[in-house]
Amino acid sequence: MVYSILGDDQSAPNIGNYGSGSVTDTATLIRAANPDRKSIIILNEDTVNEIRIGDDNSVKNDADGSADEGLKIGPGASVTLETTRGDIYGIARAGQTVIVSYYEEAD
């Protein structure tokens, strides 16, 4: 765990959780719900393949892109979510496995 202090409030440190995992072509839980989450950064570590993320396992990443659902994170890109406290799922294109990493800040 990583502890960090934001601003001048020294009394209540925010706790940072970080990790990584594989996202496949089946909706994969990247990070479970956390009611204390303040923000989370998700990084697509792949140099070629994109992923899509969403708040449930209905995210889609079709081979031709015609029925994609979810927020796209391109190769090497990241996204910061500041209000999401629920589950976060990811999905890669058919036949692909993509490594993602995250950093979550919580109370």
Image (cartoon, rainbow, N blue to C red):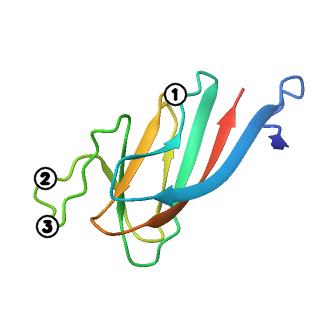
What amino acid is at disc 1? Arg
Between 37 and 58, the one nearer to me in the picture? 58
Q: Which sits in the foreground, 94 or 33?
A: 94
Q: Tell me the residue that label 1 is attached to.
A: 85
Q: Residues within 10 Å of mark 1 (few under 14, many from 20)?
A: some
Query: Which element carries disc 2, helix, strand or loop?
Result: loop
Q: Position of residue 10 (x, y in %)?
A: 89, 29
Give the residue displayed 61% in from the left and 30% down from the top.
37
Q: What mark, if any, has residue 100 been given in the picture? A: none
User: Alpha-carbon distance for marks 1 and 2?
Assistant: 26 Å
Task: Identify the residue at image location x=42%, y=71%.
Answer: 75
Image coords of residue 90 (percent x, y): 40, 50
The quarter of the picture where residue 95 lies is bottom left
Which residue corresponds to mark 2? Answer: 67
* 19 in relation to 7, above or below: below
In what element is the residue under mark 1? loop
Point out the tag, 3 or 1, that comes first from the N-terminus.
Answer: 3
- Judged from this view, the residue extending furthest toward the left is 66
| Image height of 90 relative to 65, above or below | above
Q: Residues within 10 Å of mark 3 (few under 14, many from 20)?
A: few
Is label 3 in a helix, a strand or a loop?
Answer: loop
Q: CA distance from mark 3 to mark 1?
A: 31 Å
Q: Quadrant of the N terminus?
A: top right
Amino acid type of the residue tagged 3 in the rendering: Asp
